[in-house]
Amino acid sequence: MAEEQKIEQEFRKELQSLLDKYDAEIHLDQRGKAYMEYDVIQVTLNEKYDKESYERIRPMIEFDL
């Protein structure tokens, strides 16, 4: 059990590092109609702007996993 927890902690740490690197968020979203809804994991990479010129470097990107 201790090894499983260690691996989980390592995974969470690496995932958080990746999310921080891309200024990204992960959330669960529901799709479909009321009688046939299904869950989808959605990733959002936030817009990125140059701090000096305020020019957009990257648009907001959303995709499903």
Image (cartoon, rainbow, N blue to C red):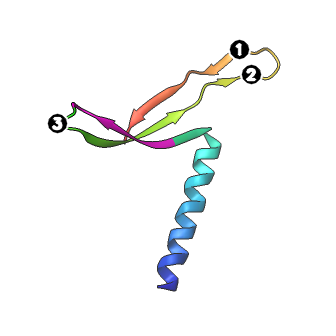
Q: Picture coordinates of residue 26 (x, y %)?
A: 49, 43
Q: Which of the two discs, 1 and 3, sits closer to the camera?
A: 3
Q: For the view shown, which residue lies furthest in the front direction?
A: 34
- Amino acid under disc 1: Glu
**Which residues are drawn in magenta?**
26-33
**Which of 2 and 32 lies nearest the eye of the viewer?**
32
Secondary element under disc 2, as helix, strand or loop, is loop
- Amino acid under disc 2: Asp
Numbered label attached to residue 55? 1
Identify the residue position indicated by label 2 in the image.
50
Q: Quick one: label 2 or label 3, which is nearer the N terminus?
A: 3
Left or right: 42 with respect to 12? left
Residue appearing at x 30%, y 43% in the figure: 39
Q: Quick one: label 1 or label 2, which is nearer the N terminus?
A: 2
- Mark 2 is surrounded, within 10 Å at the Cα level, by few (under 14), some (14 to 19) or many (20 or more) other residues, namely few
Numbered label attached to residue 35? 3
Q: Quick one: label 1 or label 3, which is nearer the N terminus?
A: 3
- Mark 3 is surrounded, within 10 Å at the Cα level, by few (under 14), some (14 to 19) or many (20 or more) other residues, namely few
Left or right: 35 with respect to 5? left
Task: Evaluate if marks 1 and 2 touch, with contact meaning CB atoms under 8 Å apart.
Answer: yes
Task: Evaluate if marks 1 and 3 touch, with contact meaning CB atoms under 8 Å apart.
Answer: no
- Amino acid under disc 3: Tyr
Numbered label attached to residue 64? none
Q: Picture coordinates of residue 20 (x, y %)?
A: 64, 45
Q: Picture coordinates of residue 38 (x, y %)?
A: 25, 41
Quarter location, residue 56? top right
